[in-house]
Image (cartoon, rainbow, N blue to C red):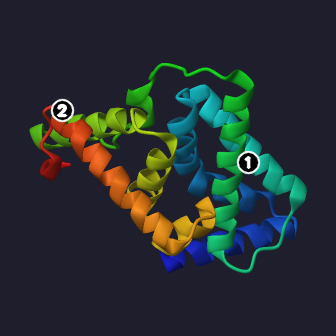
Amino acid sequence: MSERKGFEAIRCYRRFLDGDNRALEQLVREYSDALIRFAYCYVKDSATAEEIMEDAFAALIIKRRRFDAADNLRAYLYKTVRNKCLDHLRFHKKQVPLADVERVLAIDGNAETENSLLRKENRRAVYEALQNLPSQYREILYLTYFEDCTADEASRLLRRTKKQIYNLLHRAKTSLKELLIKEGISYENV
């Protein structure tokens, strides 16, 4: 997350704490899509992922915690989503088949060129391959590549040391590469 976006997010949250509900709406717009995609990596159901995102914001509203920096706010939201996903999985104890991938991976824009279709297809293949990885690999890859988390941020979110994050990321990338090669997808084009 860019420093400017992070600063704006924490300002919005502080405005919300001061009674400005429109600021909360702005925060939801800023984080909701990413949190839904993150939750989807766990629950594999878009409706459930949306509910979990909503529950995370509800927890934020109820607890009204004070955050020193945007990274802390972001980490809180991701941790809350992660914990709610794990609770959901524990409660349901079953895997839901991959569905709604098109909606979750929607690419903006109406005009689809051959290049954009290829990127979209590669992105879908990567996302499907991610679903076949162990959850800890999915987490680290999603946070690193889809949410641009640094090793420090991932370390705080996942409660691991930076060394563990680097090792986990290496193993996850290796596993993903193997899956993509099995599927006949050029790893370099992804």
Quadrant of residue 50 within the rendered picture: top right
Q: Which mark is residue 41?
A: none
Image x and y of residue 70, in percent: 64, 73
Badge 1: residue crowd in 10 Å (few <14, some 14–19, many ≥20): many
Image x and y of residue 165, in percent: 47, 65
- Residue at x 58% of width, y 41% of height: 39
- Residue at x 20% of width, y 43% of height: 119
Depth check, mark 2 against mark 1: the one in front is: 2
Residue at the disc numbered 2? 182
Check disc 2 and give the amino acid type: Lys
Q: Secondary structure at mark 1?
A: helix
Check disc 1 and give the amino acid type: Ala
- CA separation, marks 2 and 1? 37 Å
Residue at the disc numbered 1? 56
Q: Secondary structure at mark 2?
A: helix
Q: Nearer the viewer, residue 19 or 180?
A: 180
Image x and y of residue 116, in percent: 18, 42
Q: Tag 1 or tag 2, which sits nearer the N-term?
A: 1
